[in-house]
Image (cartoon, rainbow, N blue to C red):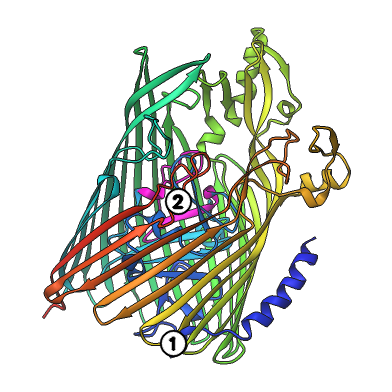
Amino acid sequence: MMKRFMLPLCAGFLSQTLIAQNKAAQQKDTLVGENAITVFTATKTERKLTNVAVPVQIISQKTIQQAGSLRLSDILSEQTGLFMTNGFGTGVSMQGLNPDYTLILIDGEPLIGRTSGVLDLRRIAVGNIKQIEIVRGPSSSLYGSEAMAGVINIITDKSKINSLGLTARYGTYNTADIGLKAGIRSSRINYQGFGNFYRTDGFSIRPNSRERSIAPIERITQQHQLGFRISDRTQVSVSFRLNNETIQNNITVTNNGNAINSVGYEKNNDLNTSLQLAHKFNEKVKNTTRLYGTFFKSIQDLITDNGAPYVDEFRQSFGRAENQTDIQFNKRLEMNVGGGYINETARSTRYDNSSSVKTNRIGYAYLQTEWKALDQLILIGGARYDHNELFAAAFSPKLALQYKINPKLSLKASVGRGFKAPDFRQLYLNFTNTAAGSYSVFGSVEAQKIIGELNRLGQISSLEPAFYGLNTLKPEFSTGFNIGIHFQDSKWLVSANIFRNNIENLIDSRLVAYRTGGAQIFSYLNVKNAFTQGIETDVQYKMNKNLSLTAGYQFLLTGDQAEIDAINAGKVFTRDQNGFSRRMSRSEYVGLPNRSKHMANFKILYAKNAFFANTRVVYRSRWTTTDTDGNGLFNSNDAFAKGYVQVNAAAGYEFNKGLSVQAGTDNLLNYTDVINLPNLPGRTFYLTVSYQFFNKNPK
């Protein structure tokens, strides 16, 4: 199947890109030029974007500001191949893989505090972001667990200027956002500070509903970064980030046919701090030592109509010490070698023996070599070894190349191994939902013991076949292939990337037993071998110095190989229009749920002197949501969410003396989907005013 899909796609891909071009031609051909766009995430060292051998996308500070984005999820939702998921906060899916397979970093350090694998991107303000770097494809050879689909790294602004600026925005649903950013620089000290206050009344697209799709929220974020130049060769920096949010919850659940209203609050606290020491021994050897610690706490405190309290608490910490040495042997050969130690803890009221702290310790080492074999050819090879306390060791190699066919045309290819370790939820969860049929979910570590004890007490009516497959969870692995091509001149930018990810030992929840009253019991097993494959293309055309057009498109196919084998063997049945059972054909198979086969975007950007205006269109085709025929997989006879188009627009003007204004509207067509897109509000408007008190280089 892969050959049938890849070969014709490659042919069309190559023919298309031979008529396309890329805007970076004006940049000097140096590793890091003064005017070049540089990227850190792809290699853990600063590199010129055009010299990176893996698929990388850069979102600039100017793009973020002119789009009127407030939170990280806003700007990512408009990028090719990324779509925002709705459950447990707003997560991001990349290359067709779930949000828990994409690693989210701030200045190269990971964020924690995921719920069911989803890191809520609305926690991250964008007011002090310099650029966002998106690396697609397995990146575990540098970053370890959770980097199976790729890495999104938020690079904060560390401009070495004296500055002070204030931004205020007000919009629909009484949404207010105030940001203050300051910078101070002397000959040895560089300080950057950022503060943000955000609040909204929330919204509901459900008529006459007291429950809000987006609950009333208040968030306060502050970040401080201080750098000190000890000498020309030695620099030290320290950073501190704190995000506090309070969410007002009004939730209605049904228990035994009765509606129960719950009122209360969810409070989340996110603290990150880091210390970095960089020393340049000579022109060829540099060493960087990083210490990083982060803590996340979430508490839900609800009171139901009948006065019953409900408290759900989750605490997680992550500490890491890492050292990396960069060595340049000559003009053609460089090496990065590093290693570190991680200590991670978690405690939750939903975990077995919730009073105890769950701990995991990881030691790791990595090596990466970059070789400029020819003037036109760059080869990168690397690998990482992770020794994890809770499961077997993981080895993650990667190989990438870039070949510049001529000054305008370049080819990129990479193959890598990614992995994701079982999380604390999959290992230790001990949760029973009494409001929805009293089903239970037990983590793999304690499932056999808990169910065995319930069986001994006569509380189990049957053990399902999956119960006998319960075992120590293994990490999930993926092997990812990417082939990309770029063609460039002064007017055009066209890039395209073909990808394929084979996922092994995919962790899934399975029904393992029934209680005597009929309640179901679930646990986690390594059960699936899945795949995602497709093509992503981006095109930019600069019509003149003021007007440019951009477009992006992703075609995506997904599936579970075991399900495909069962269909081909005639073991899967569905129902016809009259409700009669029949064998399902391979052509009816859709693949993994909640994925759209087609996604696209189109943008018109205009800027002249102090004025700018833009219109951005995002399209997503339909996707499966519910297995309505009950055959255990998703096919064309199941329930689908409708495809939709979202149109956003903004315009702004910068006056003299530092004053600028911007106005915009999101979801101009007022598209809503109560069931499948509860986080998408109707048409919204906003007005932003910014004032730069001063912005100048130090004397």
Estimate the x, y position of residue 68 in percent, counting from the top left.
Answer: 32, 62
Magenta span: 99-122
Q: What residue sits right under mark 1 in the picture?
A: 30
How far across and down, in percent of the image, does residue 108 sit? 40, 60
User: Is 408 included in the stretch rendered in magenta?
Assistant: no
Say which residue appears at 44% left-offset and 85% top-offset.
Answer: 543
Does residue 426 appear to the left or right of 153 in the view shown?
right
Compared to residue 129, the image places residue 50 above or below, namely below
| Residue type, mark 1 in image | Thr
Is residue 626 placed above or below 278 in the rendered structure?
Answer: above
Q: Which mark is residue 341?
A: 2
Amino acid type at image mark 2: Tyr
On the image, which quarter does residue 167 sit in?
bottom left
- Name above or below for residue 497 compared with residue 178: below
Q: Nearer the viewer, residue 82 or 513?
A: 82
On screen, residue 132 versus residue 644, left or right, reads: left
Find out whether residue 120 is within the magenta segment. yes
